[in-house]
Amino acid sequence: MEVSEAKRLKALEAENAKLKKMLAEQMLDVATLKEMLGITF
């Protein structure tokens, strides 16, 4: 693996971690809102 490929991989892994965190936060927000509204599934 070349240096540029390793840097790209590291950047993609960082972006992936950021997106996973954003998704988890949004899922928590939705769950909280559903609980506040008394919606159950």
Image (cartoon, grey):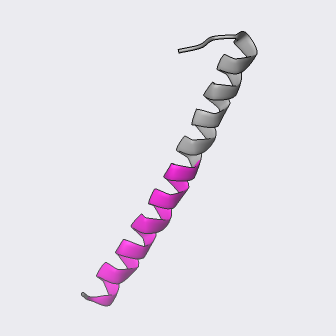
Considering depth in this image, is 19 or 33 the residue closer to the camera? 33
Magenta stretch, main secondary structure, is helix
Q: Is residue 5 above or below residue 12?
A: below
Vertical side of 31 occupied by 2: above or below: below
In the picture, measured across the screen, residue 41 lies left or right of residue 39, that is left
Query: How far across and how far down the image is residue 36, in percent?
Result: 75, 17
Residue for point 51% across, 60% down:
17
Residue at 39% x, 80% y is 7
Residue 30, by quadrant, is: top right
User: Is residue 38 rendered magenta in the image?
Assistant: no
Q: Residue at x 49, y 66 (%)?
A: 14
In the figure, is residue 29 to the left or right of 22? right
Q: How many numbered badges does the structure rendering display?
A: 0
**Residue at the right extreme of this rendering:** 36
Q: In the image, is residue 11 part of the stretch drawn in magenta?
A: yes
Q: Quadrant of residue 9?
A: bottom left
Residue lying at the far front of the rendered structure: 41
Res 35 quadrant in image:
top right
Question: Of 38 and 8, which appears nearest the observer?
Answer: 38
Residue 32 in percent (x, y) is at: 70, 26
Quarter of the image containing the N terminus?
Answer: bottom left
Furthest toward the left, the residue is 1
Q: Which residues are magenta?
A: 2-21
Question: Would you place residue 25 above or below residue 21 in this image?
Answer: above
Q: Residue at x 65, y 18 (%)?
A: 34
